[in-house]
Structures are given as structure tokens and as C-alpha cells.
Image (cartoon, rainbow, N blue to C red):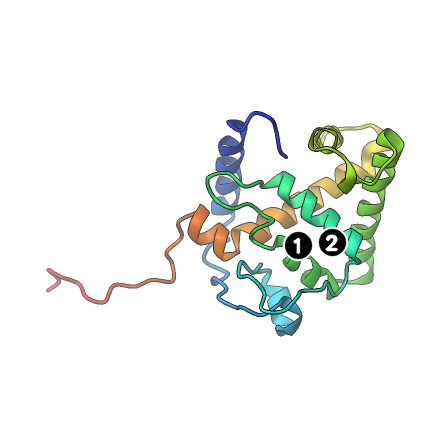
Amino acid sequence: MKSNDENTHPGRREALKTIVAGAGGLTAFPILGQTQPPQTQLSSEAQSGRADSKTPEAPWKPLFLDDHQNETIVALTDLIIPETATPGAKAAFVNWYIDLRYNEESPANQQQLIQGLAWLDGRSFSLHGNAFVRLTSAEQTAILNAVANPNNANPEDRTGVEFFELIKGLTIFGYYTSEIGLEQELKYRGDTYNASFPGAC
């Protein structure tokens, strides 16, 4: 989540890198080089869980989310992995990945995502009289801080805690399997090879 103290971002990013590397996710998903919006891709891309990082050639429209839900996803992912020295989740189009994936998810999983987004707006209206995307960064961060602790046992926060865990995982996976996350953030070079081997027998 965004903070006024930019020095907190590198530490969080290092932690996220460790999570991804430890999960062995870097070798399983090749880097995307596509230039068209996700709705033109085969459904296997949703299963592979990759986010695009190229500017679309035509205006992109979500397949599953409505415009407000998509805007909320963009705001959430940007708070979880903001831009620092390298681009953040928004620039990596992590919202495309989430929309594409959930367009093919089971109805139960789709409902979980939609209910989480509805809970977030409900809490935002309750506290500040406006939708989450219309709040200030400080107000958004305060709401997320309350549900970011998985040990939060407040019954009123249960849906929010579960939703934050879900969206955090989707954001991390979508970002670090995107071209931006792999090449710029993690400096991953698994798709390169040596043309020659000087000194080899």
C-alpha cells in the first residue's frame, strides 16, 4: 500500500520478490510480448496467469468486471505494488490479468471477488461517504491497513481480510509474471542464451 514514506516501498518490494522467487514461479511462466488486448488471446493465457505490459493497440475493455470494479482493482493493485524506481502494478496492467482470469473462473470464485469489492466500497461509504476509488490515498491506505493483518479476528473485518489476501496474491502473481515484473523488477533473464562459449573444450 502507498505510504507518505517512500522508503518503505523498496523493503516491501524486496519481501515480495522473495515470496515469488521462493515459490519457484519465475521459470513456469514465459514473458509476454503481446501487443493486443487480453480479450483477443486464447483462454490458455488465463490459465497461465500472465499479465501484459504492452500498451494496447485498441481501447481495452474488461470482459468480466464492470468499469467501476475495474477502476477499483487498478487502485488496489497500485496501492499494493506502487511505482518506485520501476513501474508498478498499474503500468504492468495487472487489472487485465485479474479480469481475464476471473472471466474464466468458477461462479463461486467470481462471486468471492465481487463480494470483496462490494465490501470494500461498503466500508468506504460507511467511513467516508464515498466509493473506495474516490477516497484520498491516506483514507484508502487506512482502510487496507485494517484488513491487511491475516490475524485480524474482528467479525466485521472478516470479509475484508479474506478479500485483501486474495487481491494481494493476485497482484503479486500478475505483476511478477508480467514483462515489467520479470525483466525490470527481478532482472530475470531466463529467456536468453549464450551464442558461443569461449574457452569451452
- Is residue 155 at least partly visible in the picture? no
- Picture disc at residue 70: 2
**Dot 1: what SS?**
helix
Q: Secondary structure at mark 2?
A: helix
Closer to the camera, 62 or 117?
Answer: 62
Q: Amino acid at mark 2?
A: Asn
Task: Name the residue: 83% across, 35% down.
Answer: 124
Q: Residue 21: which disc?
A: none
The disc at residue 95 is 1
Q: Please, which residue is most extreme toward the top here?
A: 5
Q: Position of residue 107 (x, y in %)?
A: 82, 61
- For the N terminus, the quadrant is top right
The residue positioned 60% from the left and 26% from the top of the image is 4
Specify whether 102 is left or right of 29.
Answer: right
Q: Is residue 44 above or below residue 148?
A: below
Find residue 162 and report its horizontal and vertical position in percent: 76, 41
Q: Is residue 18 left or right of residue 51?
A: left
